[in-house]
Image (cartoon, helix red, strand yellow):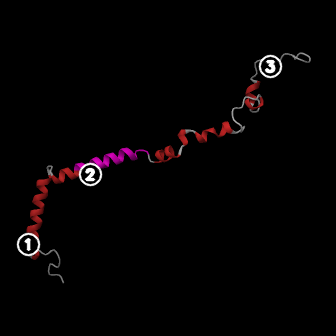
Amino acid sequence: MTGPPRPPPEFPYFPFKTWRVNPSYLEGRVRHADPWGRREAWRYNDFFSAKNRIRNMTPGLGIATVAFAVYVAYDKWYQSSGPGAEENAKWAKWMEEREERIGGGSAQGHGHH
């Protein structure tokens, strides 16, 4: 140590390092070539990646898509070979009888034109 000894600090417990301007940069402990690099690092975090931003814009889209696919599959099964198949057959037969009563099997006209 060269020069005269320093006097003891006036406020020994005051956090001087906390109030210094960018202490790590002044002490030469900067890990980034850019002094603002540490402040910009959040932009490159995985949380802010394009994939996560798009994914977070549509919360619940994945489960909604799966639920809709299950609903469509169940409805298709119910109408084709499930309990609704018998009811559909009855309605199809009723529609055929109705068409025969109305216009002899043709669906157009019905005597209007």
* Camera-side residue of 93 and 48: 48
Residue 6 in the image, given as x and y percentages of width and height: 87, 17
Q: Which residues are the magenta region? A: 59-74
Q: Which mark is residue 100?
A: 1
Q: 5 above or below 76? A: above
Cα–Cα gap, marks 2 and 1: 33 Å
* Camera-side residue of 26 and 31: 31
- Quarter of the picture holding the N terminus: top right
- Quarter of the picture holding the C terminus: bottom left
* Camera-side residue of 53 and 31: 31
In the rendered image, which residue does mark 3 sit on?
A: 11
Going by the numbered disc 1, the residue's amino acid type is Glu
Secondary element type, mark 1:
helix
Q: CB under 8 Å between callouts 2 and 3? A: no
The residue sitting at 11% across, 58% down in the picture is 89
Residue 25 in the image, given as x and y percentages of width and height: 75, 32
The residue sitting at 44% across, 48% down in the picture is 58
Going by the numbered disc 2, the residue's amino acid type is Val
Secondary element type, mark 3:
loop
